[in-house]
Amino acid sequence: IFKTFTKPVLAGANVIVTAGGTKEAIDPVRFIGNNSSGKMGIALANVAADMGAHVTLITTVHDQLSSPNLNEIKVSTALEMQKELQKHFESSNVLVMAAAVSDFRPAHKADQKIKKDDDQDLYTIELQKNPDILKEIAKDKNNQFVVGFAAETENLIPYAKKKLYSKNVDMILANDVSKANTGFNVDTNQITLIQRDKEPVTWPLMSKNDIAAKFWEYYEKNIK
Ligand code: CTP
Ligand code: CA
């Protein structure tokens, strides 16, 4: 299904894609996570590889990857994802940050499985804010084209615009995650492209594979 492109129009480009939700350990058997399937990021990585780019996929979810152009790096937590991204960013041309990074992690990971207590009903997990991986890496930007996502349940365009500027990225792919067929854990999505000094452009509801193809075609025509 990814073999739609015959011309290697992205040959020579070094692409980094992050995918999936991070898992932040509470104890050896439990974690804080989210509903991200990683499908959008994996589609973006597969299509870019198919178009001839060299792709580093930093991901929390494993997928059957066929292309020899794809280098998959498996991570679990936000801190691991950040570390891998820092290793590869400098030599990249494009970063697409499709991962659903947990904003928080447990401040302390228990060494052993936490036991419930017969006399206690209420428990608290203290949370520590994770670094904003995208915002931090964008500070080291040279000529990389940096793309973030924005998952919103209201005020899609104003909130996404705010992220474009506060994170100093070049483009935000905004998606409304309040609807059943857009966003988390489904095969379709609806994207609004947000860029500096350009009107937002909303694409129709499409499969994540089609969105990935449309994104890289846009990149190849307008950015590269
Ligand atoms: N992101 C990141 N590191 C984080 C949180 C988010 O790199 N700790 C990235 C995501 O991968 C995405 C973009 O920032 O590309 C926006 O993520 P989102 O969750 O929509 O926004 P936040 O900045 O976390 O703000 P909020 O969740 O409060 O809306
Ligand atoms: Ca967030």
Image: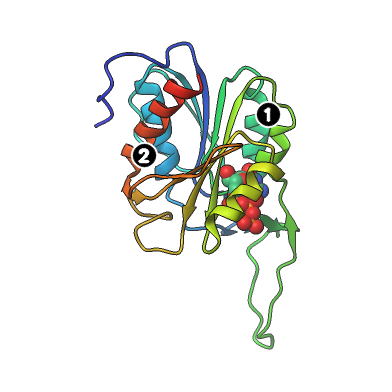
Mark 2 vs mark 1: in front: 2
**Residue drawn at (64%, 24%), measured in percent from left and top?**
89
**Residue drawn at (50%, 48%), measured in percent from left and top?**
174
Circle 2: element type: helix
Report crowding for label 2: few under 14, some 14 to 19, many 20 or more residues within 10 A (C-alpha).
many
Name the mark on residue 147.
none
Picture quadrant of residue 203: top left
Image: 25 above or below 96: below
Q: Is residue 215 left or right of residue 7?
A: right
- x%, y% of residue 101? 59, 48
- x%, y% of residue 8? 35, 13
- x%, y% of residue 195? 56, 38
Name the mark on residue 86.
1
Residue placed most toward the observer, 145 or 43:
145
Residues at circles 2 and 1 in contact by the CB criterion of under 8 Å: no
Location of the N terminus by quadrant is top left
Image: 159 above or below 68: below
Picture quadrant of residue 185: bottom left
- x%, y% of residue 153? 51, 63
Tell me the amino acid under the disc marked 1. Answer: Gln
Tell me the amino acid under the disc marked 2. Answer: Ile
Which residue in the structure is indicated by mark 2? 211
**Residue drawn at (60%, 55%), measured in percent from left and top?**
158
Q: Disc 2 and disc 1: Cα gap in Å? A: 27 Å
Q: In this view, does 176 lie to the left or right of 162?
A: left
Report crowding for label 1: few under 14, some 14 to 19, many 20 or more residues within 10 A (C-alpha).
some
Precedes in sequence: disc 2 or disc 1: 1
